[in-house]
Image (tube, rainbow, N blue to C red):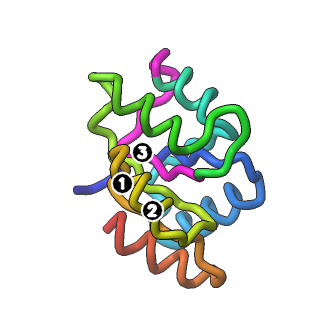
Amino acid sequence: MAFSKILVIDDDIDDQEIFLTALESVSTSIQCVTSGSGVDALKRLNNDEITTDIIFLDLNMPIMTGQQFIAEIKKNDRLCNIPVIVLSTSSHQPTIDHAKSLGAAGFITKPDKFSELVRILEEILN
């Protein structure tokens, strides 16, 4: 599947910028919107302020965790089929299993190297 619109949900602005820079290395034609919280992203998705083909989601965020966001989006008939890829610092297998059991389409542990992030995005988006 070709993706033309991406939503990145991460409370860390630096991580958002790194993702956007890596994405630009992969494709300049993909539109990307960012959100600093699951609450904000859910509100904007529900109000049709943003549309997306795929979501990249951090787990460790205040107010609404990534796990809570996945659970909420999967309850919504209009949004439940949007693939959610968790992009987290965690590599803890129970955390990965839990995210997938909630409906995450994939789980990526944030790589240390920028080039590895680019490679991962190329693999997912192309």
- In reply to whether residue 57 is colored magenta, the answer given is yes
Residue 64 x, y percent position in the rendering: 63, 34
Front residue of 87/15: it is 87
Q: What element carries label 2?
A: helix
The amino acid type, in three-letter code, at marker 3 is Lys
The residue shown at (27%, 56%) is: 2
Specify the segment rendered in magenta: 46-58
* Numbered circle sitting on residue 96: 2
Q: Is mark 3 on a helix, strand or loop?
A: strand
| Mark 1, residue position | 100
The amino acid type, in three-letter code, at marker 2 is Ile
The residue shown at (45%, 47%) is: 55
Q: In which quarter of the image is the C terminus?
A: bottom left
* Lower sequence index among marks 1 and 3: 3
Q: Is mark 1 on a helix, strand or loop?
A: helix
Front residue of 92/25: it is 92
| Mark 3, residue position | 5
Real-space Cα separation, disc 3 to disc 2, in angstroms = 25 Å
Real-space Cα separation, disc 1 to disc 3, in angstroms = 22 Å
The residue shown at (41%, 38%) is: 52
**33 with respect to 82 (left or right):** right
